[in-house]
Amino acid sequence: MKLWGGRFTKPTNQLVEEFNASITFDKELVEEDIAGSLAHVEMLGVCGILPKEDVARISEGLKTIRERVQSGEIEFSIENEDIHMNIEKLLIDLIGPIGGKLHTGRSRNDQVALDMHLYVRKQTVHLVELLVQLQEVLLNQASQHVDTLLPGYTHLQRAQPVRLAHHLLAYASMFERDLERLVDSYKRVNVCPLGAGAIAGTTFPIDRQYVAKKLGFTRVYDNSMDAVSDRDYLVEFLSISSLIMTHLSRLSEELILWSSEEFQYVELDDAFCTGSSMMPQKKNPDIPELIRGKTGRVTGHLLSLLMTLKALPLTYNKDMQEDKEGVFDTVKTLTGSLQLMAEILKTMKVNVQRMQQNVEQGFANATDLADYLVNKGIPFRKAHEIVGQLVLYCIGKQKYLLDCSLEEFQSFSSEIQADIFERLNPIAVVEARTSEGGTAKAQVLKTLEQKQERLTKLTSWLSEHQVEV
Ligand code: ARG
């Protein structure tokens, strides 16, 4: 007999049992579900809706079930459809019909919303923690490579030399924004839907604030219909996650390029690479490749949920059961990706010489020659043309700007003097970019320091937001 079997005359079709059930995946919410029920039943007692003895027996029963789940004794069943009814059925089997009082003043609609809020809240804090750890590794690598130069690229063509720290700090900026987004989303996640009932509230004199406080929520939903049908916080979670994966994917792409024989900028640690079953010489960057690849599925989960929600009338519709697997898979994917990216960055070797060599062999200092001419009073557009011709000349002679003699320089512009050789040196080129946010040492060090300070603030946010449920 189903928990809702009263108005039915036939058993459920076997295909329906399997198609309808969510227990195969929502068992992930078991801890949240029991914690929510414990808070709910305690409130029912405090408000005089259930006698204290019943509350005590139900609470004891729930705790026993929790222990049995943790020790792996419990097998959930498809017949009981989802985690909520599985737990309720186990409770009734354990303590008898009194267990049937647990669901007083509650619906699975506000219950499942509560479970997901608790789950996403816990995962948000955990992801902040993992991002902070990744950021620490990134800032540490940046601080070790303030004086390492490499070509900066646009269109994947050598553009202007930059400090490796500057390049890494660009990623730190992305992850810093991701951290801000997660922290900001927390306030919309940390809202309690319980007490909305199925849709319109309940006739029992419940105390929603009591439950909210007990479970660490800052406030309750102010509209029962919104409480049971809001999935915005899940869309937001998947959206932030997609963006984090996109940032990890761009970084992965650079590591894949940089570890190729063509670039040779970094060597990834053996522990994070794999070999080829056929080609003995191969060492493949599978992990960055997989992070890049898995970005597709996380973004897919975001689109999938948006599609599921787009035409749903108020309030709860069974379509909403489809909100879970994508979220669970996203948590698993993102957790692994963040942990592995931190390890890869921590253990990789940077080939400083190779980067320096590529800075010298190229025309990454061409803009500086144009700027030099501008400082002599030549309009930038004209200076650009002169340097363009000079570059073309060098390509013809198979050499770089610094290989030219002063006479060669002067045959393109009489304004060029002997100080040009000093000015076009890679380090001088980098140091000349003193504008705010530029790649000169003082600017890079300033940014590094600011990012370290922000990280310290996030560490204290984390210690204030450690939740037990
Ligand atoms: N398993 C359901 C879900 O995940 C729980 C809520 C079911 N509510 C209902 N009225 N059938 O959405």
Image: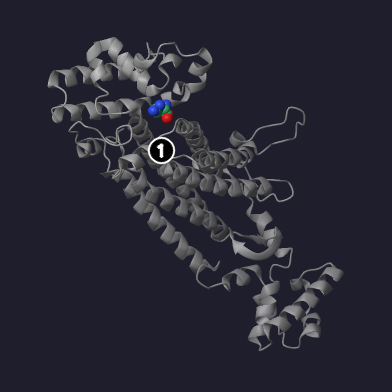
Residue 380 in picture, x, y percent from top left: 68, 82
Residue 227 in picture, x, y percent from top left: 34, 40
- Work out whether residue 10 or residue 279 is closer to the camera in this orientation and state it: 10
Q: Is residue 337 above or below residue 447?
A: above
Residue sitting at x 71%, y 64%: 360
- Work out whether residue 208 or residue 37 is closer to the camera in this orientation and state it: 208
Q: Quadrant of residue 286?
A: top right
Residue 91 in picture, x, y percent from top left: 29, 15
How does the figure colour the protein chain or chains? one colour
- Work out whether residue 318 or residue 451 is closer to the camera in this orientation and state it: 318
Give the quarter of the figure containing the C terminus. Answer: top left
Residue sitting at x 51%, y 38%: 308
Residue sitting at x 83%, y 69%: 395
Residue 251 in picture, x, y percent from top left: 59, 49
Residue underneath mark 1? 123
Label 1 crowd bin: few (<14), some (14–19), many (20+), radius 10 Å: some
Residue type, numbered disc 1: Gln
Q: Is residue 71 visible?
A: no
Ligand 1 lies under 8 Å from the Cβ of mark 1:
no
Residue sitting at x 13%, y 21%: 51
Q: Quadrant of residue 127?
A: top left
Q: Is residue 208 above or below residue 411?
A: above
In this picture, residue 39 sits left or right of residue 125: left
In this picture, residue 82 sits left or right of residue 43: right
Q: Is residue 74 visible?
A: yes
Give the quarter of the figure containing the N terminus. Answer: top left
- Work out whether residue 426 or residue 170 is closer to the camera in this orientation and state it: 170
Q: Is residue 408 above or below residue 130?
A: below
The image quadrant in which ligand 1 is located: top left
